[in-house]
Amino acid sequence: MKRMINIALPKGRLGERAYKIFEEIGYGCLEVMENSRKLIFENKENGVRYFWAKPSDVAIYVERGAADVGIVGKDILLEGGHDVYELLDLKMGKCRMAVAGPAGKRPDSEKTLRVATKFTQITKEYFEKNGRDIDIIKLNGSIEIAPLLDLSDVIVDIVETGKTLYENNLEPYETIVPISARFVANKAAYRFKRDEINLMVEKISEKIN
Ligand code: PRP
């Protein structure tokens, strides 16, 4: 009997691209890509059960074992410090975490730096390492507005094409870390379903490399 692998997919473009890979390497499942309200899909023959989760929640499902494996952005892993195995860099969803601020301007290095971000942990670690005093302003989205309204001096956010920054007269100052999607596994599941998970990892890496 094949042991079922529970796979958490992040809702959205990245999850859909990741699912296409699963499908191409023999883990297809009917209805997954159908636009319905259903959230869990199963294919007993291929030994997989998929569910769509909010991207920032995937790591929680995997960490707690509700999913055996999942697709998660490195930003979420760094921010959440989740206790999971990171088995593969999927080399998709590539972007970077950066410090950005008003174009052509650099903040006064003597003053405490006001930093607006969703990623408070990454921000704290980065500026601590650089020995810089900061005041973190936690926001939940549209971070780019903060320096425009003088709520902050800079932001720490994800930059993909740079278009959002550019269109708001902002620019990247420094890159903190490159980001991409990762294939992660629950630690206990990796012990009990090691063969199945390793086979999956092998097939995915063959496909993407
Ligand atoms: C991210 C990020 C930027 C934008 C960068 O937002 O926060 O706003 O993408 O992309 P760009 O460099 O290609 O312009 P996302 O759309 O993920 O939503 P969010 O505002 O909820 O973070």
Image: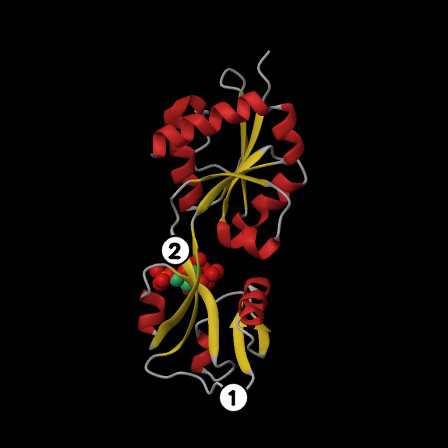
Q: Quadrant of residue 33?
A: top left
The quadrant of the image that shows the C terminus is: top left
The quadrant of the image that shows the N terminus is: top right
Question: Looking at numbered disc 1 in the image, what kind of residue is underneath it?
Answer: Glu
Q: Earlier in the sequence, mark 2 or mark 1?
A: 2
Question: Looking at numbered disc 2 in the image, what kind of residue is underneath it?
Answer: Cys
Query: Can you give x and y, in whole percent of width and height, for residue 137 in the image?
Result: 58, 74
Q: Is residue 89 above or below residue 173?
A: above
Answer yes or no: disc 2 within 8 Å of ligand 1: yes
Which residue appears at 31% of the width and 65% of the height? 163
Q: Along the line of sight, which residue is nearer the eye, 165 or 184?
A: 184
Q: For mark 2, what is the residue?
A: 95
Which residue appears at 31% of the width and 71% of the height? 166
Q: Is residue 198 above or below residue 120?
A: above
Q: For mark 1, what is the residue?
A: 110
Ligand 1's image quarter is bottom left
Q: Along the line of sight, which residue is nearer the eye, 77 or 139?
A: 77
Which residue appears at 54% of the width and 22% of the height? 196
Q: Is residue 42 above or below residue 36?
A: above
